[in-house]
Amino acid sequence: MGKALIIGCGGVASVAIHKCCQNSEVFEEICIASRTVSKCDALKEKLQGTTKTKITTAQVNADKVDELIALIKEVKPDVVLNLALPYQDLTIMDACLATKTHYIDTANYEPEDTAKFEYSWQWAYREKFEEAGITALLGSGFDPGVTGVFSAYALKHEFDEINYIDILDCNGGDHGYPFATNFNPEINIREVSAKGSYWEDGHWVETEPMEIRREYNFEGVGEKDMYLLHHEEIESLALNIPGIKRIRFFMTFGQSYLTHLKCLENVGMTSIEPIMYEGKEIIPLQFLKAVLPDPASLGPRTKGKTNIGCIFQGKKDGKDKTYYLYNICDHEECYKEVGSQAVAYTTGVPAMIGAMMVMTGKWNKPGVHNIEEFDPDPFMEALNKWGLPWKETYTPVLVD
């Protein structure tokens, strides 16, 4: 079918690359590019004897537009799948514009020097991508990503209008460390230490970090404490799902994680403000990232399951209705299949599917679009086929 250039070679990228290699009819060729080409080469060596997909590798600094343009011109991919850091979204989008190549990512842009993330920077590219005749698909992970597809599916098949969405992200896995993060520590800690917010009656309501806590009994995991966070898909769903009155996002955290995080905050280790240390300028959070366990190393240690989904409340034929769409994923099963824990798996699989949707033309809409703006049905079918089967119930326990 075609060729994909995959930028990044961390835990999520590894899963997406494994899945592309399982899906050789679509991904006839892939090029894996990263600042550290040795990681790409190691993954190529591991996979190339197990797949019909032709694998090449390349070195690139995703902060440099000129390097990205040169690589895209050399590789000539049908799509660029950005699995690098969110700081690099705009440089990669610039390179895709210059070469008129479709773009897919899993997380919205955030500036490296400011603990803030929102879609405004990427939405500003809408006219440019329309004029270039290429598609930018934003947020093709799980949350954002599958949660947006779930919302579009619920609106298409179950509701006339959706009024309330609660997104629940539960990780019931145990890796045995007192403190570690299941994805990039720098991004994770910036996200959970920021103020929370939710969308209600047309505006944002801001909360203090971890101020709002709820308990919920998750199928396959059990009872967990979850906390309200700001999360990027709230921003796009508030615009793209008609009838919305409120959207909230909750994520589970164990007490050990929260205790360690508070201690690290209190001593300044989560700061992104530069400090001088032995004559060199360092950023404390980046130093902390360097000493914490690499999320990619957690796979063989992690046991338990994740449960991520959306509870919808709205109306159908004039009557009130509730509906819950969710996925349960097993850490140990993910490791057996692709050598990864479930948090990377639940992001990497949808990344591959999003790239497949664009590459095959099932999703083809020039401009910059969030995932819920497309027909959800082929994506939902692909989730069942490629390792993230979804469940549904019409009698969920609601979050107060």
Image: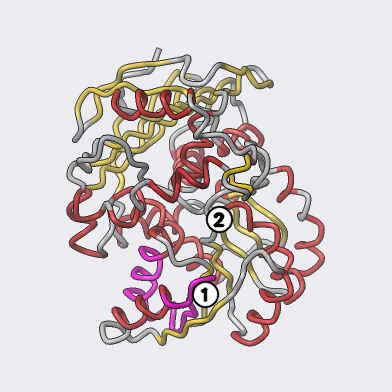
Label 2 element class: loop
Residue 183 drawn above or below residue 321: below
Residue 200 drawn above or below residue 189: above
Instruction: Using the numbered discs, state the Cα–Cα distance from disc 1 to disc 2 in whole angstroms.
Output: 13 Å
Q: Nearer the viewer, residue 271 or 317?
A: 271
Residue 59, image x and y in percent? 55, 78
Label 1 element class: strand
Q: Nearer the viewer, residue 264 or 157?
A: 264
> Residue 20 lies in what quarter of the image?
bottom left
Q: Give the residue displayed 29% in from the left and 56% down from the top.
A: 297
- Residue 85's disc number: 2
Q: Give the residue displayed 62% in from the left and 17% down from the top.
A: 205
Q: Give the residue displayed 45% in from the left and 23% down from the top.
A: 313
Q: Which kind of residue does numbered mark 2 sit on?
A: Leu
Magenta-drawn segment: 14-38
Q: Nearer the viewer, residue 355 or 255?
A: 255
> Residue 307 lies in what quarter of the image?
top left
Which residue carries the number 1 mark? 33
Q: Residues within 10 Å of mark 2 (few under 14, many from 20)?
A: many
Residue 281, image x and y in percent? 63, 48
Residue 167, image x and y in percent? 44, 31
- Residue 367's disc number: none
